[in-house]
Image: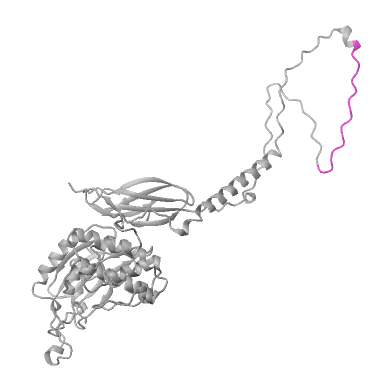
C-alpha cells in the first residue's frame, strides 16, 4: 500500500511503517501526527532564485509540481519533494540518480534539465512536453485500441531498452510517468529519480513488468494485481490477439526469471514479430553505439487508398488540360501548307488588251449569328500581321482539382525541434505530418548543437521519411 502521508514509498509489510517518512497507519499517537511539511508559499520563496514559476500543475502531501522557466529560459516541469519525506542520504541519492539520467539521450525519454536542493525541498526539472499523462488518458478515454497499444509498447520499450543498455532503470514506471503528446507519441519521464524517491529496487526485470502492467491496463481498462498473475487480457477483451495476450501474461509473471530476457524481447513478442527480431530495429549512432530506430519503415493500412486518390487526381488534371486545349483550338485557324509561288506572266500592251475581264462573284450572305467581316484596309508594306488573340478562359470556368497532401516523418539523433518553411511543427520523432505537395525547407535544431537544413520534395499522397539527421555538438 502506498503511504498516505508522503505518497512516495509503500508501507512495509513487516514493520507496518513507511520507509521514507516513518508513518504507520492506525498506530495512533505521534505516528498519526503529520510531520511539519513546508507550504506552497515556502516552495515559491525558496525556488524563486532559480526559476520563474508560472502554474501549479499538481500537489501532494510531500511536494508540488510546477510549470516554470529555468535560468536558461527553457520551459520545464519542476517537481519538489519535502525533505521531511526523505532519508538522511537523500541529497547524495538524488545526485547519483540525476547524473545517471543526464546520460540518457533518446527520442522517447524526456531529458532531465537539472536537480538540486533548498532548505526545505529536493527538486528536479525536466523538459516540458505538451500533452497529457497516460493516467489522464485512461481516466478520460478508457481502454485503448489494440493498434494504439502496439504503438505504445514500441515507443516505451525502445526508451527502456536504451536506458537498460546504459545501466539505468526507471524503478517506478507508472501511467503518471508517461506523457502522451498531441500526435500520440509516448515519452517516459522521471527516469531513475522516480525510482529513487519511491524507495524500490530498480531493475530491468521490474521495468519489464511495469511496462506489461501498463499494456494490460490499456487493453482491459483494469490494473493488474501487483503480486499475482492476473487473468489473461484476451479473457477480458476478446479482440486481443493471442500473441499479445500471451506476451503480456508472461511479462507479468511474479517470478522475474519467468519473464522475457529483455524488454526488447517482450516488445517483439507483444507485436507479433518473429522470434529473434529486435523491435524496434537498431541503427548506428555517431558515437558507434546502437540506438533504436523509432520511425518504422511501413505503410499503415489507412493509407492504402493514397495511390487510387493520386490516380484520380491525375485523371482530373488531364481532363482539365483536354478541355482547355479544346476551347483554344476552336479559335485558332488550321495551318495551311505553304506552296511555292507560281511565276507571274509577263504582259505587254498587246496581251493586256486580250485579257478577258474576270467576273467578281457576289459575297455570300452572312449568318444571322455572325457579324460581317470589316472591309480590308490597305496596309503598309512594312506592317506585320498581328496574331489573332485567343479568348481568355475565366478562372472560375477551370475545373477545381483536389490534391491530396503528402506525409512527412522526421527523426534525428539526438532529438531536435523541427521547423517546416520557418514554422515550428514539433519535436522529433515527427510522424505523418500532412504537408502540401512541392518543395519544403526543413530545419532541425537544438540548443548546443549545429542546426541541419534540407530542401525536401513532397509528392501528393506519398510519404517521405527522413531518419538520417544527425545533430553535431557545438562544444569542442
Which residue is pictured at 23% across the width and 57% down the height?
105
The part of the image, by quadrant, that contains residue 292 is bottom left
**Which of 160 and 277 lies nearest the eye of the viewer?**
277
**Residue 352, x across and y down, in percent:** 88, 11
Specify the color scheme.
one colour
**Which of 289 and 281 lies nearest the eye of the viewer?**
281
Q: Specify the segment rendered in magenta.
A: 353-369
Answer whether residue 267 is magenta in the image: no
Classify the position of the N terminus by image quarter: bottom left
**Residue 121, x across and y down, in percent:** 15, 73
- The dominant secondary structure in magenta is loop
Which residue is pictured at 78% across the width and 29% down the height?
376
Q: In the visual, does 434 lie left or right of 312?
A: left
Residue 243 in view in this figure: yes
**Which of 414 and 221 lies nearest the eye of the viewer?**
221
> Looking at the picture, does residue 412 appear above or below residue 262?
above
The part of the image, by quadrant, that contains residue 375 is top right
> Looking at the picture, does residue 388 appear above or below residue 14?
above
Residue 177 in view in this figure: no
**Which of 231 and 160 lies nearest the eye of the viewer?**
231
Which residue is pictured at 16% across the width and 89% down the height?
32
Q: In the visual, does 325 lie left or right of 102?
A: right
**Residue 403, x across and y down, in percent:** 53, 52
Residue extending furthest toward the left: 88
> Looking at the picture, does residue 459 appear above or below residue 80?
above
Which residue is pictured at 17% across the width and 65% down the height?
115
> Looking at the picture, does residue 279 appear above or below residue 27?
above
Residue extending furthest toward the bottom: 29
**Residue 343, x across and y down, in percent:** 77, 13
Amino acid at each position: 500500500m502506498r503511504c498516505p502521508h508522503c505518497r512516495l514509498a509503500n508501507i512495509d509489510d513487516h514493520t507496518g511503517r513507511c520507509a521514507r517518512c516513518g508513518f504507520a497507519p492506525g498506530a495512533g499517537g505521534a505516528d498519526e501526527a503529520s510531520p511539519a511539511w513546508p507550504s506552497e508559499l515556502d516552495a515559491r520563496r525558496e525556488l524563486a532564485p532559480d526559476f520563474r514559476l508560472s502554474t501549479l500543475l499538481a500537489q501532494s502531501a510531500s511536494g508540488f509540481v510546477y510549470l516554470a522557466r529555468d535560468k536558461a529560459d527553457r520551459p520545464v516541469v519542476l517537481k519538489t519533494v519535502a525533505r521531511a519525506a526523505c532519508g538522511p542520504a537523500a541529497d547524495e541519492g538524488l545526485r547519483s540518480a540525476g547524473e545517471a539520467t543526464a546520460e540518457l539521450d533518446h527520442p522517447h525519454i524526456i531529458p532531465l534539465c537539472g536537480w538540486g536542493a533548498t532548505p526545505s525541498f529536493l527538486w528536479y526539472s525536466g523538459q516540458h512536453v505538451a500533452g497529457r499523462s497516460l493516467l489522464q488518458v485512461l481516466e478520460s478515454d478508457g481502454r485503448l485500441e489494440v493498434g494504439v497499444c502496439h504503438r505504445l509498447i514500441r515507443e516505451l520499450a525502445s526508451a527502456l531498452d536504451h536506458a537498460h543498455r546504459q545501466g539505468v532503470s526507471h524503478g517506478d514506471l507508472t501511467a503518471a510517468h508517461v506523457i502522451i503528446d498531441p500526435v500520440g507519441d509516448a515519452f517516459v519521464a522521471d527516469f531513475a529519480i522516480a525510482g529513487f524517491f519511491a524507495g524500490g529496487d530498480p531493475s530491468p526485470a521490474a521495468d519489464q513488468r511495469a511496462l506489461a502492467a501498463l499494456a494490460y491496463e490499456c487493453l482491459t481498462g483494469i490494473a493488474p494485481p501487483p503480486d499475482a498473475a492476473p487473468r489473461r487480457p484476451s479473457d477480458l477483451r476478446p479482440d486481443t490477439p493471442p500473441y499479445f495476450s500471451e506476451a503480456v501474461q508472461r511479462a507479468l509473471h511474479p517470478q522475474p526469471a519467468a519473464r522475457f530476457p529483455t524488454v526488447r524481447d517482450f516488445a517483439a513478442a507483444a507485436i507479433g514479430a518473429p522470434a529473434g527480431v529486435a523491435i524496434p530495429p537498431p541503427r548506428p549512432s555517431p558515437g558507434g553505439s546502437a540506438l533504436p530506430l523509432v520511425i518504422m519503415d511501413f505503410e499503415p493500412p489507412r493509407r492504402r487508398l493514397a495511390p487510387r486518390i493520386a490516380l484520380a487526381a491525375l485523371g482530373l488534371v488531364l481532363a482539365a488540360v483536354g478541355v482547355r486545349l479544346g476551347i483554344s483550338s476552336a479559335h485558332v485557324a488550321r495551318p495551311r501548307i505553304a506552296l511555292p509561288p507560281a511565276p507571274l506572266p509577263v504582259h505587254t500592251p498587246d496581251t493586256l488588251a486580250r485579257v478577258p475581264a474576270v467576273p467578281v462573284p457576289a459575297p455570300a450572305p452572312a449568318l444571322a449569328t455572325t457579324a460581317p467581316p470589316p472591309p480590308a484596309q490597305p496596309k503598309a508594306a512594312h506592317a506585320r500581321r498581328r496574331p489573332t488573340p485567343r479568348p481568355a478562359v475565366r478562372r472560375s470556368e477551370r475545373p477545381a482539382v483536389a490534391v491530396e497532401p503528402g506525409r512527412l516523418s522526421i527523426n534525428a539523433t539526438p532529438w531536435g525541434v523541427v521547423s517546416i518553411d520557418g514554422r515550428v511543427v514539433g519535436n522529433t520523432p515527427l510522424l505523418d505530418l500532412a504537408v502540401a505537395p512541392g518543395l519544403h525547407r526543413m530545419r532541425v535544431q537544438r540548443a548546443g548543437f549545429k542546426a541541419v537544413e534540407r530542401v525536401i520534395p513532397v509528392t501528393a499522397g506519398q510519404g517521405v521519411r527522413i531518419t538520417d539527421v544527425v545533430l553535431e555538438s557545438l562544444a569542442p
